[in-house]
Image: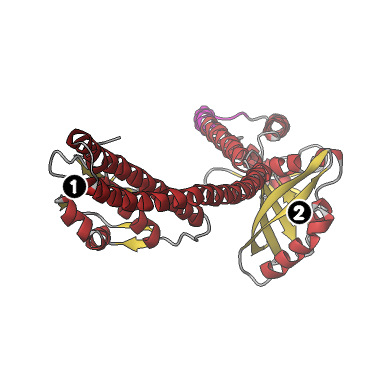
Amino acid sequence: MRSAVKDFGGKVRGECTEPGPARVRGPFPLTVQTVYKAAAGRNGPAAGKTIMGNTDTLSEHAAELRRRAEVLVRANEAQQKEKGGEMKPEEVRRTLHELRVYQMELVMQNEELLRAQEQLQASRAAYFDLYDQAPVGYLTLDENGLILTANFTAAKMFSAGSRPFIGQPLTKFIVPEDQDIFYLYRRKLNKGAAQDCELRMLHSEAAPFWARLDSSAGRGPGGAPLCRLTVIDITERKGIEAEKERLIERLDEKEKEMEAFLYTVAHDIRTPLICVQGFAEHLDKDIKQLLGLLKQAAMPEKIRAAALEIMDSLVPESLESVKEGALKISQLADALIKVARLGQRKIRPETLDAGAVVKKVLAALAFQVKTAGAEVKVDALPSCKADPSAFNQILSNLLDNALKYRDKRRRLKITVRGEKTGCGTVRYTIDDNGLGI
């Protein structure tokens, strides 16, 4: 094979014939460009690209260039001796200058290669960190569900180091009972929509784990259909969900037990309470009859006065205390039944006008407010999201308590306020100057 050697002006100055000893014909000055073109003549146009391709072959290529340069130099010297001529001083200076220029170019090219190598290494490290060291598993599947590529995280998930991984069907790593889930998942994916599912997957050296699969359909370099898949280990989350379900079931059981207990307590309280209230009413009537008899009976006036004081003042006061206590116990029993029923209600929150709800509650308590002579002030209240029935019941209980347990030595003042807390909730406050707790 022959390769033409040209000078810097593009003029052909000689030829190099290979293989075999180099034979150079024609008087030409030896330059770095001559050496480079001679190397390119042997290796083809890709010779220059090879230098840029991989720094591992850069030193080998440089050694090859040096060997070829030495061959050309020796051939040139032999040719000059045969002709008995030597290069003129001007040619020597020009060649030396060109060699220095090309030396500098080679230094600059070497620096560019080093920078490119550093950038390549940084890019590869970033890719390694982003893909292989990602906290989730990355997989690429072909149209048959075979694993084409996977990152280190995915390999660790399936402990692929102890058995084949690439080229295996993903179904090999899915619990048999969950194969149908993956089959339906792939059918939906083949329609082109991104999908996700949760199933159990196998680990070669540990118990099966729960995984969430998220995928999207794509195309490979040749246009073949591909499935890009992420695998996230959700075993811990599934454990938390199972514990949550267990606690909810246990809470439901305790709630039913509490309801039964409250109903029982309310019933046990109400049964003797009815007797107390009934006997209190009868006793009230008997005392009134006894007062009438005392007034008509013949007895010393001093004894009559003492008996009348007891029966007309002290006994009625005690009897009134008994009636009030019985009424409070009755209200307590009613409250217990209400609490028990709350557990059976379904909470359905909706946006409420708190001011309108308070107004409705006060309208229902208008008689008690008037009887107590209370002054009720309602500030502007922000709306909230709550169950209407439960919210109404809470406000009714609080206002009713304020009215019942007032301090009779002063006028009752009730203030209803509301404010947003800044964390998505609303706080309502009912202040009163009653007896307190």
Q: Report whether residue 223 is seen.
A: yes
68, above or below 368, in the image: above
Spatial CA distance of label 2 from label 1 is 71 Å
Q: Residues within 10 Å of mark 2 (few under 14, many from 20)?
A: some
Please tell me which residue is depicted at 31% across the width and 55% down the height of the picture. Answer: 396
- 360 relative to 254 in the view: left or right: left
Q: Position of residue 129 (x, y in %)?
A: 60, 37
Q: Report whether residue 387 is seen.
A: no
**Looking at the rendering, in which quadrant would you find the C terminus?**
top left
Q: Position of residue 188 (x, y in %)?
A: 68, 69
Q: Is residue 101 magenta?
A: yes
- 216 relative to 92 in the view: left or right: right
Q: Position of residue 54 (x, y in %)?
A: 66, 38
Q: Choose the circle earlier in sequence order: 2 or 1.
A: 2
Please tell me which residue is depicted at 58% across the width and 51% down the height of the picture. Answer: 260
Mark 2 sits on what residue?
A: 148
Please tell me which residue is depicted at 69% across the width and 60% down the height of the picture. Answer: 227
Q: Quadrant of residue 33?
A: top right
Q: Which scheme is used to colour this image of the protein?
A: secondary structure
Which element carries disc 2, helix, strand or loop? strand
Mark 1 sits on what residue?
A: 415
Secondary structure character of the magenta stretch overall? helix
Residue range of the region highlighted in magenta in the rendering: 86-105
- 436 relative to 326 in the view: left or right: left
Given the image, on which type of amino acid does mark 2 rest?
Answer: Leu
Instruction: Looking at the picture, tell me which residue is in the foreground, 164 or 30.
Output: 164
272, above or below 27, in the image: below
Given the image, on which type of amino acid does mark 1 rest?
Answer: Thr
Which of pointers 2 and 1 indicates the residue nearer the eye? Answer: 1
Q: Is residue 100 magenta?
A: yes
Q: Residues within 10 Å of mark 1 (few under 14, many from 20)?
A: some
